[in-house]
Image (cartoon, rainbow, N blue to C red):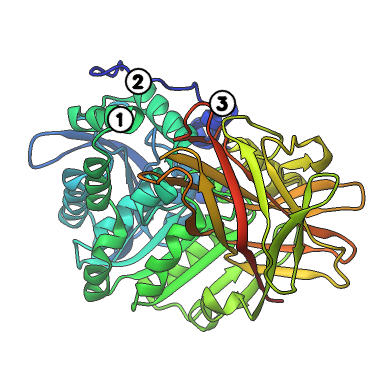
Amino acid sequence: MPVHGRTRRRRSPSLLGAAALVLPALLTAAPPASAASAAVSTTALTLTMPDGTGLTAELTRPSGSGPHPAIVFIDSWATPDFEYLLQAQQFAADGYIVLEYDPRGFYSSGGSIDVAGPQDVADVSSVISWLLANTSANPAEIGVGGVSYGAGLSLLAAGHDPRIKAVAAMSAWTDLDYSLYPNSTRHQESTDLLAAAAELTGTLSPDFQNILDDFYGDTDISDVLSWGAVRSPQTYVDSINANGAAVFISNGLQDSIFAPNQLLPFYNDLSTPKYLMLQPGDHATSEASGLLGLDNTVWDHAHAWFDHYLTGAANGIDTQAPVQVEPIGGSSYQGYASPAAMTASSTTYQLGAKNWLGTGSLSTGAAGSFTTKTNAGTASCAAGGTLEVSGILTQFFDAPPSCWLPAINRSDDAVWQSSALSATDHVRGTASLNLTVTPSASSGTLYAYLYDVDLLDDGTLISYLPYSYSGATPGKPLQISAQFLTTSYDIPAGDSVALVLGTKDPLFLDADQSGSTVAFGGPSSLTLPLGR
């Protein structure tokens, strides 16, 4: 559907990124025969909401009279209402009733897309009420789950409906404002992709259209943030705790739409039973194979979560370390008592003066004074990667984004590098950056990239961060503190650590002013979190 209103400058999303959102569900259109499908039945439905809006749905039932535990699966953004068909059959074979539906505005469902607005949340409760009234679902054993859009809506619903006893949220958002606007920087490519997919498969609400106009026009951002807060599970975490739903969350470490950072405050604030899985992969890629009926670790844990917290199965998931993280390039998960427990110690590097090659020093010695000046507005090979593509390459081929550091023009980007490590550094958690910055303009955007650099000066991206500032006094130093994306990565002995600071990244819309410069000086530091 076309989006009306003020003209927006928007880049086209990558085809692979769009496919990553919708292909896993489309591939289930002709599911393979399975033992589970022979023992269960699936019926296509249209559920009528209290306001008369019809939502397309699929009801999958087990044999037997019940009562049965029940799960409501909410379809992902821009995916049809058979996304979870193979998972529904597996759950039904284990005795569950499963109802999945397409939210308002998508495909054949009525209404318009309001991005998890209050009516979307109310629809979850209406679907549960229909399920209880029309099937043998046990009212004491109701779960809700989904991937991406379905994940966020499931968490929101848990804060509004105490009938929900367990949630499985995969590739979820908990803070929509952070996801759209991390460190006051507009996340362009993810918004491009979501908007384009919505226009292709549904009908946007006027409110959503206006929000997109404000976002791309960089106007009324306070309204955008207020709109996002209403749609953020973090806003309702106290209600989720009061209602008592057991919450399972899984996300990719390279999720380029809903970064893992925005999950951690929410997870920490939960007082109900909770479980967090983080693993290499991008948005909705870690759980995608499970939608195709293949073995999948994330879905295995989701099954165990529902089995334990809905039916009381003694499967041990409640006794495991509640935070499970698979390092990038690793092959097994590491368990922690909390996200903070990932980090056992830290190393702080001071940024220093540059050598004759234009590379500054990163050392653990005392802070010193230096000045490194760069021009704003030029991109380099240092970047956060390509939406969806980079995370998929990391997950399946252990190939994070890379950059050959000698290729970086030191007039446009600033580079610092440590000496070779004497032992492996196990980066675990959230690295942080403290900078002294003197801009020549009142507004601008900085991007920081953390690299693992080998003997040939090839840098492998460990993590990155965007940061935008406004209202600065030209020529006056700013003190900037920001956090990188949470990660789990091993830097081998013999490699070095590098920090690159630039002003352009295709993932984001920046606030740089043409012809401006940025000067970096001391004291400035980089802190790496270390674990096992």
**Residue identifier under label 2:** 8
Q: What amino acid is at disc 1?
A: Leu
Count residues near mark 2 (Cα–Cα under 10 Å), then give few for <14, some for 14-19, many for 20+.
Answer: some
Count residues near mark 1 (Cα–Cα under 10 Å), then give few for <14, some for 14-19, many for 20+.
Answer: many
**Residue identifier under label 3:** 14
Q: Which mark is residue 355?
A: none
Where is residue 515, by image quadrant?
A: top right
Residue 446 seen in render? yes
Q: Looking at the image, do the residues carrying marks 1 and 2 touch, with CB atoms under 8 Å apart?
A: yes
* Quadrant location, the C terminus: bottom right
**Residue identifier under label 1:** 212
Residue at 28 percent across and 19 percent down: it is 3
- The secondary structure type at the circle numbered 1 is helix
When the figure is inspected, residue 96 is found, relative to residue 461, above or below; the finding is: below
Q: Which one is earlier in the sequence, the residue at label 1 or at label 2?
A: 2
Q: Which one is earlier in the sequence, the residue at label 3 or at label 1?
A: 3
The percent position of residue 231, horizontal first and vertical second, equals: 26, 50
- The secondary structure type at the circle numbered 3 is loop
Observer-nearest residue: 13 or 203?
13
- Name the mark nearer the viewer: 3 or 1: 1
Observer-nearest residue: 371 or 412?
371
- The secondary structure type at the circle numbered 2 is loop
* Quadrant location, the N terminus: top left
The Cα atoms of the two marked residues, 3 and 1, are separated by: 19 Å
How many circles with numbers are drawn on the protein?
A: 3
The percent position of residue 288, horizontal first and vertical second, equals: 56, 45
Residue at 50 percent across and 67 percent down: it is 276
Q: What amino acid is at disc 2?
A: Arg
When the figure is inspected, residue 130 is found, relative to residue 43, above or below; the finding is: below
